[in-house]
Image: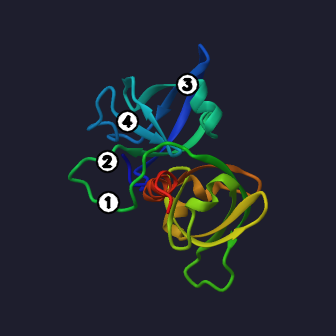
């Protein structure tokens, strides 16, 4: 489990084809791996992966073809959001996050809010229609591993447009600041919403 609070920005340094999947090496800040053991989970761009090898300030992981097909941003070198797995005595600063990507969205708008003296930015994401019922005003959504609050939803025939306000701190400490219109992002819906929907599906009135 995770919280959606990014603890570091890493760099995918190398990628090798391994069977149907890939073998990645990720560089992290000094000391970041001090409390991580082989087999521990680390979320990369919101996708839960298993650390299989450590060398200095890098760790390696194997990513399956299924994960590659369901996510974006894990098949090329560059910066990535990282979060180590939640411990039972940790603060839940964001919300309950599983690290399982539910779908991929597209950035339709990302710009500074002109009348906001705090320098916040408006991020609009077009999400798959299948996720629309799990996304609610003032609810939570994970974008590339970052726990964010939904400020507005607008449904259309084929998609759901989601508005999110991004504060400067988030821009500076995650990879979200590098987003631009047209980029695709990993999305995870709220875990509680998922279970509520399932209960209503299996126990209709």
Query: Could you tell me which secondary element the residue under label 1 belongs to?
Result: loop
Give the mark nearest the N terminus, 2 or 1.
Answer: 2
Q: Point out the residue furthest to the top here.
A: 19
Residue 58 tag number? none
Counting from the top left corner in percent of width and height, residue 172 is at 52, 61
Q: CA distance from mark 4 to mark 3?
A: 15 Å
Query: Could you tell me which secondary element the residue under label 2 belongs to?
Result: loop
Q: Tell me which residue sits at (72%, 51%) in the image.
A: 183
Q: How many marks?
A: 4
Residue 41 tag number? 4
Mark 4 nearby-residue class (10 Å; few <14, some 14–19, many ≥20): many
Mark 2 nearby-residue class (10 Å; few <14, some 14–19, many ≥20): some
What residue does disc 3 label?
Answer: 64
Query: Could you tell me which secondary element the residue under label 3 belongs to?
Result: loop
Query: Could you tell me which secondary element the residue under label 4 belongs to?
Result: strand
Which residue is more in the foreground, 9 or 198?
A: 198
Give the mark nearest the N terminus, 3 or 2.
Answer: 3
Which residue is more in the foreground, 204 or 115?
A: 204
Mark 3 nearby-residue class (10 Å; few <14, some 14–19, many ≥20): some
- Check if mark 2's residue and mark 1's residue have beta carbons within 8 Å: yes
Residue 51 in which image quadrant = top left
Counting from the top left corner in percent of width and height, residue 33 is at 33, 36
Q: Is residue 3 visible?
A: yes
Q: CA distance from mark 3 to mark 2?
A: 23 Å
Q: Tell me which residue sits at (64%, 55%) in the image.
A: 178
What residue does disc 1 label?
Answer: 92
Give the mark nearest the N terminus, 4 or 1.
Answer: 4
What residue does disc 2 label?
Answer: 86
Q: Tell me which residue sits at (62%, 46%) in the image.
A: 103
- Check if mark 4's residue and mark 1's residue have beta carbons within 8 Å: no
Q: CA distance from mark 4 to mark 1?
A: 17 Å
């Amino acid at each position: 489990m995770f919280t959606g609070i990014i603890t570091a920005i890493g760099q995918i340094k190398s990628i090798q084809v391994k069977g149907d999947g890939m073998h990645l090496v990720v560089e992290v800040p000094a000391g970041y791996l001090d409390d991580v053991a082989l087999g521990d989970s680390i979320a990369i761009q919101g996708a839960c992966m298993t650390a299989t090898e450590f060398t200095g300030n890098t760790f390696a992981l194997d990513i399956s073809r299924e994960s590659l097909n369901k996510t974006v941003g894990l098949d090329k070198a560059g910066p990535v959001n990282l979060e180590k797995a939640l411990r039972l005595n940790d603060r839940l600063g964001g919300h309950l996050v599983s690290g399982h990507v539910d779908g991929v969205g597209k950035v339709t708008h990302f710009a500074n809010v002109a009348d906001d003296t705090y320098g916040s930015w408006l991020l609009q994401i077009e999400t798959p229609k299948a996720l629309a019922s799990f996304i609610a005003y003032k609810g939570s959504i994970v974008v590339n591993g970052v726990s964010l609050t939904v400020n507005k939803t607008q449904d259309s025939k084929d998609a759901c447009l989601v508005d999110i306000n991004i504060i400067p701190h988030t821009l500076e400490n995650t990879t979200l600041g590098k987003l631009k219109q047209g980029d695709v992002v990993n999305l995870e819906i709220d875990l509680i919403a998922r279970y509520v929907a399932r209960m209503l599906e299996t126990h209709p009135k």
